[in-house]
Image (cartoon, rainbow, N blue to C red):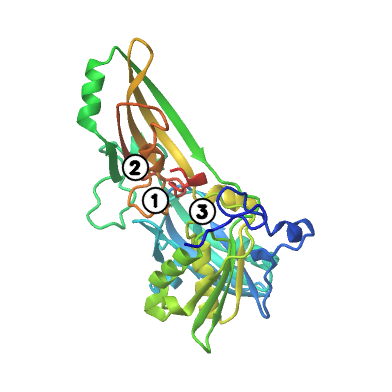
Amino acid sequence: MKELKTSAEVGGMGHSVKRKEDARFIRGKGNYTDDVVLPGMLHMDIVRSPYAYAKIKSINTDKAMAIPGVHAVITGEVLKGYNLHWMPTLMSDTQMVLPTDTVMYQAQEVAAVIADDRYIAADGVEAVEVEYEPMKAVVDPFKAMEKDAPILRTDKEGKTDNHIWHWETGDAEKTEQVFKNADVVVEEKVYLPRIHVCSIETCGCVASFDPAEGKLTVWMTTQAPHAIRTVFALVAGHVGLSEEKIRIISPDIGGGFGGKVPIYPGYVIAVAASVVIGKPVKWVEDRSENLQADSFARDYHMTVEMAASKEGKMEALRIKTIADHGYTDAAANPSKYPAGMFSICTGSYDIKTAFTEMDAYYTNKPPGGIAYRCSF
């Protein structure tokens, strides 16, 4: 058998992997999504809701369309005509691309303006007139659990509550027995607040549809290009964009940390705009949009119990968690339930047994549940 040798120069097991990108970054030669410029490229900006929960009574785009340089204003009704107004998340949920009747969180996408440059698009956004009917928002998962709470996801047929899923792992019976016989039981309520990734680079894309070949190329700030391609095909397969006709290019990324795994509505709107208008479309969100509307992590209300001996040895752990996942579950996992850290809550300690359970609820907040730094 040939012996496999490694070295500091070659790399491999036992050696650090040498970085190859430093030289061009130090010289300012990085290539990011916003660096992509294509012939005839248009720019997109987004109209966002000032309310966390409201009915959309009307959208008037006349003033925006009258601005020189504005090519189109895309609304939920426009996308509905192509059956593109809803899309799957990267887990087991669905989310709006653009709403047709109700906004579910503050800063949610309501319409998109396509123009010659970003500044004209921003002027167009200011000119779009949206009439809202505000409703009382539910921003607390415990309020969402109440029997008289409004059902937020009325788009889901037969939905009678705001519960998303229940998940558990461990040995419930054995853990209960250890707690019954424990010398000491300690309980603490812990709130793990909502966390935003806030990478240096915000999210964005350049969508370019080639009508001659019927193929789509998208440069985008994504950590999961293959999964994103699959979702694009699921969303737009019925209009001819099957997976083999879609190419996703993920250039240099200015930080991701899990926040650039989900598929955001802006990506899909840009693709739809490129297909409809027939020109490349660039969308890059600003910092305020990034902080308000992109997916979040955590927002967990945990009741943690520990059973211990008189000598101070931990014998069992029991954790019950209520998770606030906002208006849709934005997690992107190979498993159905995004609660990875609770599967390893005992860490490297020698503990007899543990049991954890989690229930997730919808609220009027931006999507939650992403794997910030690989822990759910």
What residue does disc 2 label?
A: 360
Marks 3 and 1, Cα distance to the nearest angstrom? 20 Å
Q: Are marks 1 and 2 in contact (CB under 8 Å)?
A: yes
Q: Which residue is outermost to the top?
A: 310
Q: Secondary structure at mark 1?
A: loop
Q: Secondary structure at mark 3?
A: loop
Residue at figure coordinates x 44%, y 47% from the top left: 368
Q: Secondary structure at mark 2?
A: strand
Q: Which mark is in front, 3 or 2?
A: 2
In the foreground, 57 or 272: 272
What residue does disc 3 label?
A: 49
- Say whether disc 1 or disc 2 marks the residue closer to the N-terminus: 1
Q: Amino acid at mark 2?
A: Ala
Quadrant where the C terminus lies?
Answer: top left
- Say whether disc 3 or disc 2 marks the residue closer to the N-terminus: 3
What residue does disc 1 label?
A: 329
Q: Which residue is outermost to the front?
A: 1
Picture layout, residue 30 above or below residue 166: below
- Tell me the quarter of the picture where residue 29 sits: bottom right
